[in-house]
């Protein structure tokens, strides 16, 4: 494997990196739960995707696998299952959601002009080999270290990164050009995740679970503290929105067309905790 550093906004560099490639897996994105204050979310997720499409055309790439997000799809109505027929997020949605929706639109529009591309949309990705670690990885770390004084009502559909990779490889092999696939895992509340960790490691979670309205009162203080400490903020208004949306998600198309099947959530949590421990993140 050759690792080449680049910039998705550098078109010339993309062409150089993609020369003689057969398939491109486009994962580069800026994730944000604090809006798009400097414009980089939209530049990377939309303009960057436009660059990828253009470079694929110039380099005659056989197939493009574009990684979108479940947040590209509108969460409304909340009580109905989301599948690939759901409309995309609109301008009233958070900046990240809008950018992923527009990026997916760019790819699907490019298919009409001859680009062979498939769009896959994972849910909340967790798993081992989380080197940064990600925001989701930090949630597990803080649960393990008992750094939360309270949990928050709500949850996510959690999917193992290894299952997302397998789904992407299956999409490259089996999918029709222009198709979309939701790669989901299992919805679980933050409380249920904490209980899984207690079951495995004996780590007692906080007793209290704050309703979303109460947690929202703490958002300004959480954001200010993160800014002062120059750290990523986990408690924002957009994070709270995510906790209460995208709960009912269908992966039927991926199961039927690709043979996709996510592993049990407990296996993902176990493997992730073991990896984080091995790398010293839980010390």
Image (cartoon, rainbow, N blue to C red):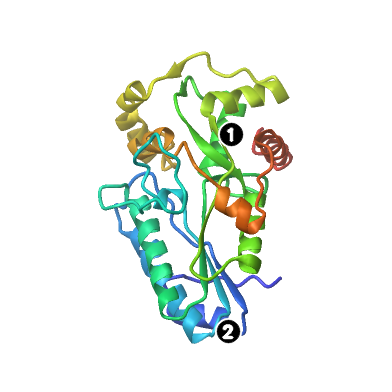
Rounded to the nearest whole Å, what is the CA distance between mark 1 and mark 2? 39 Å
Task: State left or right for residue 236 relative to residue 276.
Answer: left
Q: Would residue 171 be visible to someone looking at this image?
A: yes
Residue wearing tag 1: 140
**In what element is the residue under mark 2?**
loop
**For marks 1 and 2 on the same chain, the one whose residue lies earlier in the sequence:** 2
Q: Residue at x 39, y 63 (%)?
A: 103
Q: Nearer the viewer, residue 120 or 253?
A: 253
Depth check, front residue: 63 or 270: 63
Q: Which image quadrant for residue 166?
A: bottom right
Identify the residue under disc 2. Answer: 19
Relative vertical location of residue 183 with respect to residue 277 in this rendering, above or below:
below
**Toward which corner of the image does residue 18 lie, by quadrant?**
bottom right
Q: Residue at x 52, y 75 (%)?
A: 116
Of residues 129 and 78, the one drawn nearer to the viewer in this rendering: 78
In this picture, residue 171 sits left or right of residue 238: right
Instruction: Report whether residue 13 is seen.
Output: no
Image quadrant in which the C terminus is located:
top right
């Amino acid at each position: 494997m050759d690792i080449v550093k680049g910039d998705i906004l550098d078109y010339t560099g993309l062409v150089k990196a993609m020369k003689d490639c057969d398939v491109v897996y486009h994962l580069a994105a800026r994730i944000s739960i604090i809006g798009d204050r400097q414009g980089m979310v939209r530049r990377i997720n939309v303009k960057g995707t436009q660059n990828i499409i253009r470079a694929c055309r110039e380099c005659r790439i056989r197939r493009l696998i574009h990684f979108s997000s479940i947040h590209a799809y509108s969460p409304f109505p909340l009580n109905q299952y989301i599948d690939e027929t759901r409309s995309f997020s609109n301008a009233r949605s958070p900046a990240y959601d809008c950018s992923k929706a527009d990026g997916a639109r760019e790819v699907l529009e490019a298919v009409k002009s001859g680009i062979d591309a498939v769009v896959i949309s994972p849910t909340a990705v967790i798993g081992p080999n989380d080197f940064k670690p990600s925001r989701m990885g930090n949630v597990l770390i803080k649960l393990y270290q008992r750094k939360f004084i309270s949990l928050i009502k709500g949850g996510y559909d959690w999917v193992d990164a290894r299952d997302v990779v397998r789904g992407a490889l299956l999409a490259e092999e089996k999918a029709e050009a222009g198709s979309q696939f939701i790669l989901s895992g299992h919805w679980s509340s933050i409380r249920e995740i904490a209980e899984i960790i207690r079951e495995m490691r004996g780590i007692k979670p906080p007793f209290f679970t704050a309703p979303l309205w109460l947690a929202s009162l703490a958002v300004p203080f959480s954001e200010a503290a993160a800014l002062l400490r120059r750290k990523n903020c986990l408690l924002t208004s957009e994070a709270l929105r995510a906790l209460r949306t995208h709960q009912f998600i269908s992966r039927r198309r991926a199961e039927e067309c690709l043979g996709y099947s996510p592993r049990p959530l407990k296996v993902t949590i176990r493997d992730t905790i073991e990896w984080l421990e091995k790398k010293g993140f839980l010390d």
